[in-house]
Every structure is written in structure tokens, then in C-alpha cells.
Image (spheres, coloured by chain):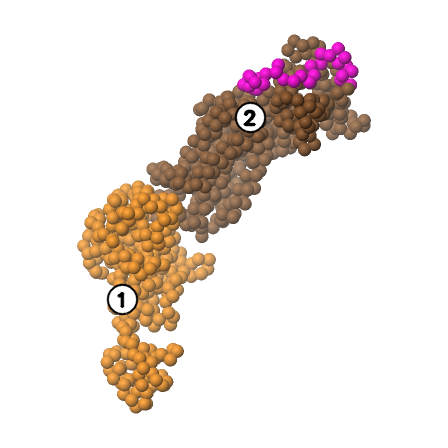
Chain colours: A orange, B brown
Amino acid sequence: MLIASALALRYHNQPHMANNSHPVVVQVEDLHKQYEGIRALCGVTFEIHQGEVFGLLGPNGAGKTTTIEILEGLRRPDSGRVTVCGMDPAREKAALKERIGAQLQATVLHDKIRVEEALELFASFYREPASVGMLLERFGLVEKRRSFFEKLSGGQKQRLALALALVNNPELVLLDEPTVGLDAQVRRDIYALIEQFRAEGRTTLLTTHYIEEAERLCDRVAIIDRGQVIALGTPRELVEASGKGTRLELRLAKPVALDRLRQLEAVTDCREAEGIYYLHAQPPAQAVAALVRLLEAEDNVLVDLHMSQPTLEDVFVEMTGRKME
Amino acid sequence: MRAAIRIALMSIRLVMRTKAALFFTFLFPLIFLFAYAGIFAHGNPAAVVYMFGPLVTLNIMGSGFWGLGTQSVMQRERGSLRRYRLAPIGSGSMVMSSLLANYLLGLPTVALLVACAMVFFHMPLQIDLLTLLALVTAGTFAFAGFGLTIASIANTMQEAQIYNNVIWFTLLFLSGVTVPLPMLPHWIQRFAAFLPATYLVTSFQAIMVGGESLSQHWLEMLVLVVSGTFGLLLAWKLFRWEKEEKISRRAKLLAIAFVVPFLLMGTWINVHRNLVAWAETYSLLGRTVSSGDQRAAPAEGILLDDFEDPQESEALLQHWQVLTEGGAAALSVGELDLILPGAAGTAHALRFHGRVAPDHGHVAARYTFALSFAGKDVRGLEVEVRGDSRLYQLKVTPPTAASAPISASFIPDSDWQTIRLPASALANPSATANATASCLLEIVVDGAPGEFHIDLDELRLY
């Protein structure tokens, strides 16, 4: 059971949704980075406002971790401009680290360090640390405070990693794939914690390749692929902008020509895979009515029909022609 | 610095919780103590004193190479440095914390070695605690520098182990840590002058056995501290948080700076200092025993020859012979004569004298003796010597074929002194209790060509 905390923040503390009128906390402009000739980032640009939960969504190898590590000051960009909390991460590392909290994709600590000791040790590095007792309580680690790191489950390790990210009571939290490899229940626990960050007014940047995570948690999302931001906006804006409308999955008794389906009223797109027909329609009701008329005319039968709203995955597929993996 | 102290204290706490680390930090050095003192020194307190320096050096080297050095690479490979990288601490704090933890863990280990050596082997602590602390501190600093430098230039654990093994075994066998320097060939002794472990071992032995002061070894200490500082700076400069970060060849060349003090020191020793000083310390073992080990007083030994027999001239021909390299054609010569007076007020002594020719440097006097072992507790052989301050070797070949010859180098001066050679093989013949067996003793003239003379008396087993 995760307990909400009354963790005090030393800055603006008004829960809110994304609002472009709030000050910019992270500014990234035309970021480029190469590793041994391989392009990792190519002109990445976005900004994050105070109090916002911002998601970098993309497949593995898209450039999410490189971006977040540049923001943390762990890597230098080849070119481009980065400002975090008004500072240059490459030049003002020490001052910046006092104001940001970060969780790595994989946090590795000494096997024999106890949970409480780890928090106390890392808290001791900061000028204004958070209360270790409060962090233990907030992240559901009170019972595990004396446990060795090696004895923790994956979820407990990730909660400890999140607690370590908050050990300096940061105004900006950077989370790199916070739920990767965790089971559904643990993921939901982590989601609840991240939602608390927003409720406290913290600015949060998270990278993920889980659509559900981005849709559920993020005020705004930048979809990143092969080092480039290919879409940026709220999840709703991105889905609506895709213009494909509601998705329909059909199974028919007899095959039908794709052209006939494409010509149906309100249908915007159509394709077939392994005997299943995938249609996008806007508005969907008109498309269904037209479909029924077509099937009657061709003496065909509708075996199965599923309707769903488009997701960010659809947006990604639409923009890249690939599934997000 | 505050962060470094906190990380160091946490590291110590974590070592205390890790069985393997505990074993290698505390138990492993004790195993070596019992091996050195119990097996090599045969429990002889004087020999334990001589071996204590090498033992401490071995321990300090181990923690520098296999503790500090490999741990740093392992942490980097494991990814556990990344979390620290996110905190507002620099690479300097990480390097300092490693050094500090290594030092603080090393001190109790040395204390444990001292205590066990004194309790179990009656080792007289012939060194004051401040001097001991200074030697341990300088040594720890230097070998921590070694470990940190290797960790800095090695890209992987495998690479670090290759570097470690090459340097470790060189230091282990060629710097007096396992084999006393005077027992090694001269050219190896010259090479040993370039090795940092040699400075620590010989300083320990000169102070603990030779009664010298730390100030007489300030140069060795300085070189150790300077090299340690270089290592620390290199580690700071080349510190890497991520295993993906690889070091360039150019940066690896910086590591050469670390060995510069050793090159300078080695050259200086070879040019200005007589290497036989190390043998001199070794030769002092006998004198140390006389004062430190009352059980081994000469009067209680088994007399082999005191050269007082009225028929000594005939006995000389029977038991002693002169050996020169190259047989009859050799240009080196050696003779044996009885002289007056002998050691400690005795009438006679044996003089071995002659000349070592260039390129025919081997001259030896050989003594063959038969010995009954019935009920005897023999731990070695001793002889009173005086001579011309050149290097000699005392060599004993035990009676059993399986036992290898045992030797020790020494430098006799114009005063009589006792040279003692621990040789437990003499006490453990394969023969039955009443049997007798033949042993060989040789006085070998080492060193530069020229005249030599050495007087011998009171040859006995103890």
C-alpha cells in the first residue's frame, strides 16, 4: 500500500494539468548526438513546462535515453541547446544535480546495502535532503528498510530507485523507463506514485515505450523515432490529428475486395491481414451502416466486429509504417 | 571530502557484510602469516621478524591490486557507479573514498598480523608503532596508486586482471616479498631496485632487523608517496563512471608517469647504493637471534668444528676442500689455513682466503660433515665469521636427496659475528633415529674479482 505523502516542496506547489503559461523548466532545441558515426539524435526539439508530466514515447533505440542523459548532464550533445531549470547541464552539473532527481533505466546498488542505508547515503550528498523516514513511508518501503538490496523484488527495487530520485526533494524528476520489466500490478503502483508527483506540482519527464503508460500519465507526449521527434502534443491531440478515426476489425464469411471496403462511406483507411479487415472510419456509425449494405448486396455475412478508439500506437504506426517494439 | 568519507565508511560496512571480502581482508593475511612464520621461518622468532616486512608488504599489495584495483573495475562493469554519478559528487570523491576505505581496512589487518605474530610466534616487535604506521601508510598509498592506475587504464575486468597478474607476480617473486632478496641472483637484485615492493620490504627489514631508523629510509618513503600521488591523480583524471566509456591509447600513456619515480629510484640505487646492504640485513639475522631467542644460545648447539683439535691440519684435509670454477684451469684460487686466535677467546679459527679472477668468479670452501640425529632438535646451522666486507654465501645441502640446498648471503666485517641459516631439513632426515647422514656446507665467494679472506669459527648446529 503506497501512502500519499505531505512531502514539502520548496517551490511552486499547485497541482495542475499542462499549461503553457507556466514557466519553461526544460528547453531542448535542435539536439544532435552521434555515437561512432551512428546517429542517435537528429534535431530533437521540445520544451517542458513547470508542473507538467511530459513523456518521451518511442521504440527501443529511438533516442529517449540519450535525450534524458543529456538533460541529466551525463552526456554532452554534439550540437543544440539544452536548458534545465535555467542551467546548462553540461556546464553547471553540480548545481543542477541539487535541483533534479533522476531514476536510471536500471539502478544497481551494492548487494549488501540496506534500503534505509542507501537512502541515507544518497541523501547525505545533498544540501537540502528529503526526510528518509518520509520517503520510506511514501514509497511503501518501511517494512523493507532493513532489507539488503539483493533481497528486494523487481518492484521494490524500482520503488527504491524512485525514492532515490526524490531524495533531494527535486523540482524536476527524470524517469527513464520507470516500469520496464515490471508486472501489471507493480506498474499500477508506479503510476500512482508518478501521479502523486504531478499532484505535488513537480515537473516530470518520463521515457517509455508503453503506450498505456504515456496515455495514462502524460500531459503531453513527444513521439520519438530514430532520433527525431515525429509528433508532439497531448495524447488526445495526437490521436485526433491522426485523422483516421475509430478502428473497426472485421471477420467476414467470404473474402471481399479491399477497394470495395475503401469506397464505403466514412471509411478513411482499410487493410487486411490474415483474414481480418482493419478499417478506420469517421464517423464510425455511417461506415457500419454502409458496410452492412455492402455485405447484403454481396451475400456475405459479418462473423465478428470489434470497434476501438485509436491509440498513440496507431499514431506511431501511421507516422512510421512500423509497430512500436 | 565529506561525501568521500561517507562513501568510504559505507564501503567498509559493506565489506564487513560480504563473506568473500571478509575472508580476503582478514583471514587470508593470517593464513600467509602462519605459512611464512610457521613453515618458512620454522617458528624462529628472529626469522619471523625478518619475514614480517614481506608479509605486511604482501598484504598491502593484495589490497591495492586485488581489492581496490579490481573492485573499481567491477563496480564500473556492474553499473553501480551510475547511481553515484547522478548525485552532486565528483570523480575525486569516488577515488578518495576508495583510497580511504582501503587504508582504514588495512590498518586493523596489520594490527592483527602484529598481534598474531607476537602471540603465536613470539616475534619481538622491533619497530615503534609510529614507524610501523608510517611504513604501512606509505605502502598502502603507493599500492593503492597502483591499483587505481590499473583500474583507470583497463577497459574491462579481463584487461585489469591481465595487468594485475603481470605486475603482481613480478613484485611477488622479484622484490623480496616471497624470496629474500639476498637469495636471488645479482642481476635480479639490480632489477628489484626498480620495484616499489622492494623499497617497502627492505625498509621494513632494515628497521626491524637492522635496527635502522625510518629517517634512513626517507627516500624510499618519498618515492612510495610520490608514486601513490601520481596514481591518485591519474585515477582522478581518467575516472570513468560507465563501462561503455573506453579509454584512449593516448590516455593510457599517461600511466607511464606512475612508473617514473620507480625508474629514478631504481637507477639511483643501482648507481649509488651498494646492493649488498640487503644481504647485510639478512646476515644480521644471526645476531638478532642471539639477543632475541634465548632458546637458541650457541652454547646449547651441537658443535661441528671449533678448529681446536691438535690434529686439526689433518682434519682440514679430511673434511674441507676448496672448489674453484673451471677446475685446475681456473684462475681463481682459494686456500684454507688455521690462524690464531679464534672467536670469543678460542685459540684457533679457519681462514679461507684467495683471489677471484675476472670471469672465473666462483670460489668456494666445502665442508662435509656426518651427523647423528638421534634425539636432536636441529633447526639450522650457525657459524662465527669475520672478513673483508665482501659478499659471501653460506650454503647447506641437507642429507636427504629430496631437500633442496638452503643458502643465505652475508657480509662479514672485521668483528666476529654469528651467521645463522635456518635449515629445518637437517632436523627431518628420512633416516632412522640412530642413523647418520652426510651434509655439505659451502662458503661461496660472491661478487667482484679480487682478493678475499674470511675467518670461520665455532661451526655448530642449533
Q: Is residue B315 highlighted in magenta? A: yes
**B449 versus A60 height, above or below:** above
Could you tell me which secondary element the residue under label 2 belongs to?
loop
Front position in the image: A315 or B31: B31
Question: Which residue corresponds to the image point at 76% horizontal and 16% vertical from the top-left?
Answer: B315
Could you tell me which secondary element the residue under label 1 belongs to?
helix
Q: Nearer the viewer's eye, disc 2 or disc 1?
A: 2
Taking the image as drawn, is residue A303 in sight? yes
User: Which residue position holds label 2?
Assistant: B43
Residue B53 vs residue A132: left or right? Answer: right
Taking the image as drawn, is residue A88 in sight? no
Whole-Å distance between the Cαs marked 2 and 1?
A: 80 Å
User: Which residue position holds label 1?
Assistant: A235
Q: Give the farthest residue toward the left.
A: A14
Identify the chain of the residue marked 2, using the numbered disc in the image: B
Question: Which residue corresponds to the image point at 63% horizontal and 29% vertical from the top-left?
Answer: B183
Query: So how many labels did they put on this image?
Result: 2
Q: What residue type is labelled 2?
A: Gly
Percent from the top left, x then y, of residue A73?
Answer: 35, 51
Marks 2 and 1 share the same chain = no
Question: Which residue corresponds to the image point at 38% horizontal and 44% vertical from the top-left?
Answer: A112
Question: Which residue corresponds to the image point at 60% horizontal and 20% vertical from the top-left?
Answer: B286
Q: What residue type is labelled 1?
A: Pro
Q: In which quarter of the image is residue A61?
A: bottom left
Front position in the image: B457 or A195: B457
Q: Is residue A188 highlighted in magenta? A: no
Percent from the top left, x then y, of residue B35?
Answer: 55, 32
